[in-house]
């Protein structure tokens, strides 16, 4: 049974039907009843009048009538009725008639008021045992709102598709940001320094030899010869890498910032980028403090 039939039966029982936001229907005169339970109830023409009232509120008696016939809780019955009427008002707002089956048709006039046109009013009799029986196996099959629920399912389905598409797009954006922002950065393999800083005394002055800025970086990297003479007093190691290629790339980048850096290795396993200095060891503290403005972690290493 559809919701329109419930509205008709409520009108037959109470002689009055109020729909919130729409108005009130009133039934005048006696309605002949047939002794044959199979024959429908026929309502005479022009026996229903309509009074437009956009301020009409919910009829609690109608909600209770719906509860009895659907065995739903009252808040759910009220919500379903309001949704059904909201759908009808949407039809009226876009210029379409709101058809109440077995009752008539509502149209919006040029002035904005609703006009009722009675239809062929026939009401099928309700079988009492289906209304009050507690042994109904599938009460969902007697849902009064099947047509309305189909419309709601369509709307819900459309919203679900939009939500899924939104999540897919968001996922793609997150992946792009991760790939280009963090993944590529993670390819640069840096090593945290575990070597201790050489203990030195404080220096009152920071002197940097002019030769420290003119020392070229060798094109190829080789193991440091322990017996060779090193022109530098100490190196300030700023980066360490296991990959020679990554070390060279970082070296070239630092050079573009006009940093005086060299690249060397002691064992062909760890490649070190450092700034060399030909200064007394007593100046290492001042040099370290100065370079900490450019590098996060630095330490002193004495050339072998």
Image: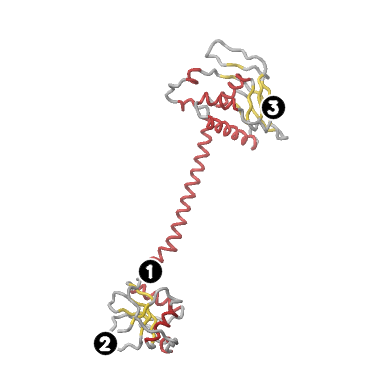
* Image x and y of residue 202, in percent: 41, 84
Badge 1 local density, few (<14 within 10 Å), some, or many (20+)?
some
Q: Identify the secondary structure beneath mark 1.
A: loop
Residue toward you, 12 or 135: 135
Q: Identify the secondary structure beneath mark 3.
A: strand
Give residue 227's mark: 2
Front of the two marks 2 and 1: 2
**Residue pushed farthest front?**
201
Q: Identify the secondary structure beneath mark 2.
A: loop
Tell me the distance, in whole angstroms, between the alpha carbons under discs 1 and 3.
Answer: 78 Å
Residue for badge 3: 51
* Image x and y of residue 268, in percent: 28, 76
Residue for badge 1: 188
Residue toward you, 66 or 242: 66
Q: Is residue 181 above or below residue 213?
A: above
Q: Residue at x 65, y 33 (%)?
A: 21
State left or right for residue 123 relative to residue 175: right
Q: Residue at x 68, y 25 (%)?
A: 50
* Image x and y of residue 196, in percent: 33, 76
């Amino acid at each position: 049974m559809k919701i329109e039939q419930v509205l008709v039966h409520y009108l037959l029982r109470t002689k009055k039907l109020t729909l919130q936001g729409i108005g009130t229907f009133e039934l005048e005169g006696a309605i002949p009843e047939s002794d044959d339970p199979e024959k429908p109830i026929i309502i005479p023409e022009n026996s229903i009048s309509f009074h437009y009232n956009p301020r009409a509120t919910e009829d609690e008696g109608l909600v209770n009538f719906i509860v009895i016939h659907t065995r739903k809780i009252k808040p759910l019955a009220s919500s379903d009725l309001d949704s059904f009427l909201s759908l009808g008002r949407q039809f009226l707002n876009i210029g379409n008639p709101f058809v109440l089956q077995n009752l008539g048709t509502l149209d919006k006039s040029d002035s904005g008021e609703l006009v009722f046109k009675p239809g062929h009013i026939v009401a099928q009799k309700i079988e009492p045992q289906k209304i009050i029986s507690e042994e109904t196996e599938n009460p969902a099959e007697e849902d009064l709102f099947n047509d309305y629920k189909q419309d709601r399912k369509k709307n819900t389905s459309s919203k679900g598709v939009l939500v899924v598409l939104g999540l897919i797009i968001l996922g793609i954006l997150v992946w792009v940001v991760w790939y280009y922002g963090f993944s590529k950065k993670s390819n640069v393999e840096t090593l945290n320094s575990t070597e201790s800083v050489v203990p030195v005394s404080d220096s009152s002055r920071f002197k940097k030899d002019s030769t420290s800025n003119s020392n070229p970086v060798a094109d190829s990297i080789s193991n440091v010869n322990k017996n060779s003479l090193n022109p530098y007093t100490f190196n300030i190691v700023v980066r360490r890498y296991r990959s020679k290629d990554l070390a060279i790339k970082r070296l070239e980048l630092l050079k573009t910032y006009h940093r005086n850096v060299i690249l060397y290795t002691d064992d062909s396993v760890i490649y070190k980028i450092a700034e060399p200095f030909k200064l007394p060891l007593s100046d290492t503290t001042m040099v370290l403090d100065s370079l900490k403005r450019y590098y996060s972690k630095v330490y002193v290493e004495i050339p072998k």
